Image (cartoon, rainbow, N blue to C red):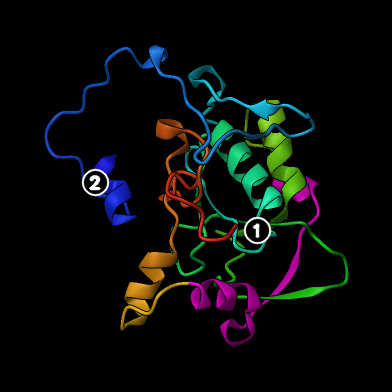
Amino acid sequence: MERCLQLRCCVPIAGELEVLNPKSLSLVLHGGPAPAPGGSKPAVANESECGVGLLDCVLCLLYLQPGHQRDAAKYLAWRCGAFTTLNPLDRAITHVIFKAVAKVMVQVSVPIDEDRVSFVDMSWLEACAQERKRVREAAFPQQRVVYNPGCDEAYARVLRRTPSVGSTASTATHVTDWSSSRSTGPSTTQHSLADQVPPLTA
């Protein structure tokens, strides 16, 4: 995990992986506890709260407001066992999370593939965490989107805050926030396991 966080991407595991006394681990959100959804007290995450309902999902949180909204989504993603990312170019993305607004078309950099990627309201993620399983996306508000990277303001803001590294590929790597909700608690990329590294946006 230290190597993954250092490189800010997932690297293959060499040799056999052994987990000793996993139930003794106490997991806390990086940067301090974040408020639990619907509660006023900080959320201290322990291993028993981490589910596997969204284990095969990668959630893009780029289009949520930085700060409380995005942190709350990272916490919920961790509770569901999902991975998160801020990199819209990540081909592993299965869901793009929004606070959906009706009759508004959002410009995105995530390729539109209706069979593989859902552009869904955050209420879906909240329901998954509450039910402790993956619920049907169709039962929740869907955000209307158009694939237009040149007009994607959210991604442009992230790129402006990322130091230039000389190439688009390198830049994309830097904006990716991989964090494994299952291993280290809430954070941002799944590959991002939900932002174990400091969030790119405050």
Residue at 13% across / 39% down in the picture?
A: 14
SS class, disc 2: helix
**Residue 9 position within the rendered picture, expressed as x and y whole percent measured from the top left:** 32, 54
Residue 33 location (% of width, % of height)? 59, 33
Instruction: In the rendered view, tell whether residue 48 sits above or below residue 166.
Output: above
Judged left or right of residue 145, residue 186 is left
Q: Is residue 165 above or below residue 38?
A: below
Q: Residue at x 54, y 55 (%)?
A: 94
View extreme (front): residue: 32
Q: Is residue 160 magenta?
A: yes
Where does residue 158 sit, x and y in percent of width and height?
A: 54, 71
Helix, strand or loop under label 1: loop
Residue 156 sits in quarter: bottom right
How many other residues sit within 10 Å of disc 1, few (<14), some (14-19) or many (≥20)? some
Query: Up-down: is 87 above or below 183?
Result: below
Residue situated furthest right in the rendering: 103
Magenta-colored stretch includes residue 137: yes
Q: Point out residue 23 in the picture as x, y percentages from the top left corner.
A: 41, 13
- Check the image and report above or below for 35 versus 86: above
- Residue 60 horizontal side relative to residue 63, left or right: left
Residue that badge 1 annotates? 66
